[in-house]
Image (spheres, helix red, strand yellow):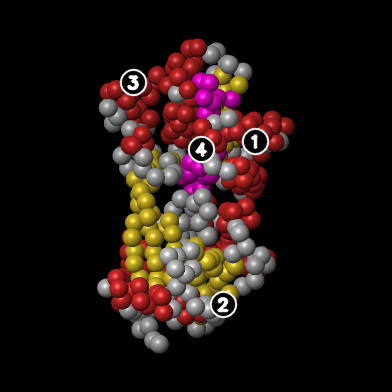
Amino acid sequence: MEYDSLPKLRAEVATWPPDDSFRAQWTTLANSNPHISPFCQLEWMEIGINVFGRGERILPYRFFDTDDTLQAMGLFQLVKEPGRLFSRTVLRTIDFNSQRINPFLTSSPKVMAAAIVALTDVVGEPVDSFDLFKLDPLDGALQEVSSLLSGQHISHELRQFNEQPYFPLDGSWVEYLSERTQGHRKRIRRYTRKLQEQYPDYRFTRYQKPADFPQSDMTVVLDEIMLLFDKSWQADALDKQDTLHDMKRFYLTVAKEFIQMEMLDLCTLHCNGTLIAFELNLFGAGSVYMLFGAYDRDYADWSPGNAILSEILQDSYTKGYKRVEFGGEYLDYKKLWTKTSSPSYHLRIHGTTLKATVKRLLAR
C-alpha cells in the first residue's frame, strides 16, 4: 500500500531491556525534540515498567526512512484488556503516572503519522487497537497527525483524555496575585504569613541537585517525606497495601534517578521542628511538573498544602521559570489558583481483527 503524502518508514523492533545503542539514539532524538518533557525520558518509562508492569510484552521501536536514516523512536507495551465477552489485545503507550507525553520521538507531524502507519503494519500478531494515551497537543501537531491519518484512510479516533491545569509564569508574583479575586488574594498571602508568625523556625527548602542535600545525601530527606506520606489522607485513600508500596517505590526511584539527571525538584516545608508538607516534582526546559505530595493532617488548619504551593510559585517566579504544571485533572480547587489549562488526548487507531472491524462498523 502506498502513502503518497507521507514519507515511507520502516519499523524495526529492538530488544528489551534496551542496549547502549538504543539508549544513545533515544537521548539524541529527545534532546532535539521541542516537545520533550521528563515523561518522555527513557528512564521515566523504565521505572514505570519495573514498578507497575505485570509482565506485559515491551516493544521498543525504531523507524527508518528509505535511506536507513533513523527518523523516529517509540516505546510501547502489548497488553490483554478484559472485554464484555472476550479479552482485547491492545498495543498502548508506556504512560504510568505521566502527564502529557509525546508518543513518538520526532517533531514532524508527517513523520509521526508515517511512524503510526509503519507501526500498525509491522506488529506480528492480531491487535484490536493501538491506544496512545495522555498525548500532548504538541502545539497543534497532534491534530495535524490525525488529519494526515484521515487522508490515508487510517481508521482512528482522537478524543480529549483530560484537562490539566498549569501556571504560565508570565510577569511577576505581584502581577499573578493582582489577577486573583480579592478574597483568594488575601488567603494566598495568609497561608504563609500565619505559619511564619506562629513558628519562628518556618522553613521552605528546594532541593534540585545532590549538593543541596545535607552531606550531599538525599536519604534522610527521602525517608522523612515518605514517613509523612504514610500518615497522609492520600495514603489512606489507596485501597491496597501493595498499591501504597508500589507508589512509594516508584517515586523514590524517580527521585534517585532524576537527581543525577538534574531534573528533580523536591520541595519541603518545615515548622515547629517537623516536616508539614512536601512536593516531589520534576523539572525540564524551564517547566516544573508537580507529581507527588502530601501534608501533615495535624496542621490541616494551617493549610500547609496551600502554603507550600504558594512558596513553589513565588520561588519559580524568582528563578525565572516558564511554567508550573499543576498535574492531574482540572479539579475545582485548582481553578482558584489558575484558569489556564491544557488538554491531553487519547488517539486510538483501530486494528484489523474481526472484533475491531465489527466494532468499527457498528460505530459508523
| Alpha carbons under labels 4 and 1: distance apart | 21 Å
Q: Earlier in the sequence, mark 2 or mark 3?
A: 2
Mark drawn on residue 186: 3
Q: Earlier in the sequence, mark 1 or mark 2?
A: 2
Q: SS at mark 2? A: strand
228 sits to left or right of 190: right
Q: Quadrant of the C terminus?
A: bottom left
Amino acid type, mark 1: Leu
Amino acid type, mark 2: Glu
Q: Please tell me whether residue 290 belongs to the stretch shown in magenta.
A: yes
Residue displayed at 59% across by 54% down: 52
Q: Please tell me whether residue 38 belongs to the stretch shown in magenta.
A: no
Amino acid type, mark 4: Ala
Q: Answer yes or no: do the residues labelled 1 and 2 have beta carbons within 8 Å? A: no
Q: In the rendered image, which residue does mark 4 sit on? A: 237
Q: In the rendered image, which residue does mark 1 sit on? A: 222
Amino acid type, mark 3: Lys
Quadrant of the image occupied by residue 139: bottom left
**Percent coordinates x, y for residue 191 in the rendering:** 42, 21
Q: SS at mark 3? A: helix
Q: SS at mark 4? A: helix
Q: Earlier in the sequence, mark 3 or mark 1?
A: 3
| Alpha carbons under labels 1 and 2: distance apart | 40 Å
**Percent coordinates x, y for residue 301 in the rendering:** 45, 19
Question: Range of the magenta residues?
Answer: 275-299
Residue displayed at 64% across by 56% down: 50
Q: In the rendered image, which residue does mark 2 sit on? A: 12
